Amino acid sequence: MTVIKINAITVPAGGGDELARRFASRVGAVDGQEGFEGFELLRPTDGRHQWLVVTRWRDEDAFQAWATSPAFAHGHAGADRPAPDGAPVSVSSELWSYEVAGGSPTGGG
Ligand code: HEM
């Protein structure tokens, strides 16, 4: 069953654009990872400071394999360097784990 792993990144006040830029030029090392089903980078639109990287995986093992792989390290090699203005890109991050417990069929309408 698909598992959903969310990295919730808290950005500094006024930050976020640099995070978006980094994802726009991301390495892409995750794209060919066994069991990877896709991700979205979600920008907050209600004034909060947590951006979400919502990733989907075939199962827990597939996620754990990526999270401990050279591909993860490669995809994050420059992730903790400061923005050009010297500010940190993220001040903290949390990993959240979910599974789909209900919803509507996809592709409707
Ligand atoms: C330890 C805290 C983490 C921070 C601060 C962080 C931050 C970032 C940043 C800034 C990037 C853009 C690429 C770069 O600048 O190198 C990135 C890439 C990415 N992050 Fe994280 N990340 C963290 C952990 C995680 C975790 C736990 C996940 C999964 C739930 C995740 C999912 C991703 C994905 C899918 C990419 C794209 C990688 C690729 O293109 O290969 N990150 N992350």
Image (spheres, rainbow, N blue to C red):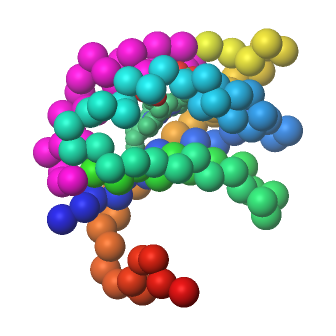
Q: Is residue 39 left or right of residue 35?
A: right
Q: Residue at x 85, y 38 (%)?
A: 14
- Magenta part mainly helix, strand or loop? helix
Residue 77, percent from left and from top: 46, 13
Q: Quadrant of residue 12?
A: top right
Span colored in magenta:
58-80
Asked if the magenta segment contains residue 20, the reply would be no
On whether residue 73 falls in the magenta region, the answer is yes
Picture quadrant of residue 85: top right
Residue 10 location, quadrant:
top right
Q: Is residue 99 above or below residue 25?
A: below
- Left or right position of 87 against 25: right
- The residue at the far left in this view is 61
- Quadrant containing the C terminus is bottom right
Residue pictured at 18% horizontal, 54% vertical:
59
Residue 34 placed where, x, y %?
20, 37
**Residue 8 can be seen in this image:** no
Residue 33 image point, x, y percent: 26, 33
Residue 62: tell me if it is visible.
yes
Residue nearer the viewer, 27 or 85: 27
Total marks in image: 0
Residue at 70% across / 23% down in the picture?
Answer: 88
Q: Which quadrant holds the N terminus?
A: bottom left
Provide residue 81's location: percent of width, then percent of height.
62, 13
Q: In the picture shown, does residue 63 fall above or below 23?
A: below
